[in-house]
Image: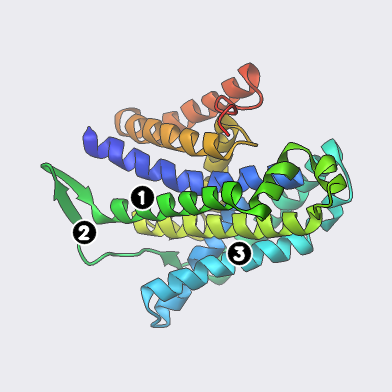
Amino acid sequence: MIPIVIDGIVQGLQLSLLAVGITLIYGLGGVLNLAHGQFAVVGGVVAALLIGQGMHVVAACVLGVLAAGVFGLIVDRSLLLPAYRYKGEERLLLGLVLTLGLSFVVDGYLNYRYPETALTVRLPHPSITVAGITIRTASVATSALAALAFILLAIFLKGTLLGKAVRSIIQNETGAELCGINATRTRTLIVGLSAVLAGLGGIAQGLFSSLGTEMGVELTIFALIVAVVGGVRSVSGTLVAGILLGVVNAVASFYIGTYLTLIILLAAAMLTILVRPSGMLAYWT
């Protein structure tokens, strides 16, 4: 049972890396990115291709994460510009349509161009034993990667002037602009940062199991569920929700199967929308 819970925590941390990007993009831009999982897949595919060309695994993964960030910047400065011209529901709906279309295009291209490409990172030592419990080294590496990313993100958001500007825009975009904060530039930076986090999530998936070109939609769905339960404007809530749902997913998948587990997770998201639309953990700052 303990190894299953550990795997759930690790998977939850990985999903939180994806979900926090959705949270940041929605909080700043008012756009719910339905192609966020594809950002992760792009980073993973680039890393896999570079590894296949003989590049060192660490260097390839770093370049893959950077490629995901560059892809996010390109999307923000091109595809999402029409959505940013609107406010409120119009921006949200147009953003949904645009990012949904982007997910189809990215999936179609990657599945056609690189159908056999997948990122699978094998560590030198497959497992370690702690207090009589065998733990995969991939789980340790994935947890460390996610924890470091969240620590750095917290320092950025709470300890830097730019991070405080980001938080002010999330709370009140109009008020932030009146105070002299350039919302457009800040939003572009955060979209790029969110794509980098998605790329890290893709690398984590490659460490934990394997990342294929067809997994973009699946990753987006799980990330959306985590973001909804945690609160689409709460970074800390997203982290906590990711860990909780990761454990639920691992335990339920082991005992009742993957299909019913997905229904349970979707039910949790629907219940959250009905009972607390801002997210069950939205009070976390």
Q: Is residue 135 left or right of residue 155?
A: left
In the drawing, what numbered circle is on residue 69? 3
Q: Can residue 32 be seen in this view?
A: no
Given this view, does label 2 or label 1 mark the residue nearer the observer?
1
Q: Is residue 158 left or right of residue 135?
A: right
Inspect the image, locate mark 1, and give the three-letter code of the amino acid beneath it: Ser
Estimate the x, y position of residue 225 in percent, counting from the top left: 55, 35
The tally of labels here is: 3
Whether 241 is drawn above or below 209: the answer is above
Estimate the x, y position of residue 283 in percent, counting from the top left: 59, 27
Residue at the far left: name it: 132
Residue in the picture at 35% in, 34% down: 253
Cα–Cα gap, marks 2 and 1:
15 Å
Tag 3 or tag 1, which sits nearer the N-term? Answer: 3
* Mark 1: few/some/many CA within 10 Å (<14, 14-19, 20+): many
In the rendered image, which quarter is residue 171 located in?
A: top right
Q: Mark 2 points at which residue?
A: 126
Helix, strand or loop at disc 3?
Answer: helix
Inspect the image, locate mark 3, and give the three-letter code of the amino acid beneath it: Gly
In the drawing, what numbered circle is on residue 143? 1
Inspect the image, locate mark 2, and give the three-letter code of the amino acid beneath it: Pro
Estimate the x, y position of residue 80 in percent, counting from the top left: 78, 56
Q: In which quarter of the image is the N terminus?
A: top left
Residue in the picture at 85% in, 41% down: 174
Estimate the x, y position of residue 193 in percent, counting from the top left: 61, 58
272 and 45: which is toward the camera: 272
Given this view, does label 2 or label 3 mark the residue nearer the observer?
3
Tag 3 or tag 2, which sits nearer the N-term? Answer: 3
Cα–Cα gap, marks 2 and 3:
30 Å
In the rendered image, which quarter is residue 137 located in?
A: bottom left
* Mark 2: few/some/many CA within 10 Å (<14, 14-19, 20+): few
In the drawing, what numbered circle is on residue 279? none
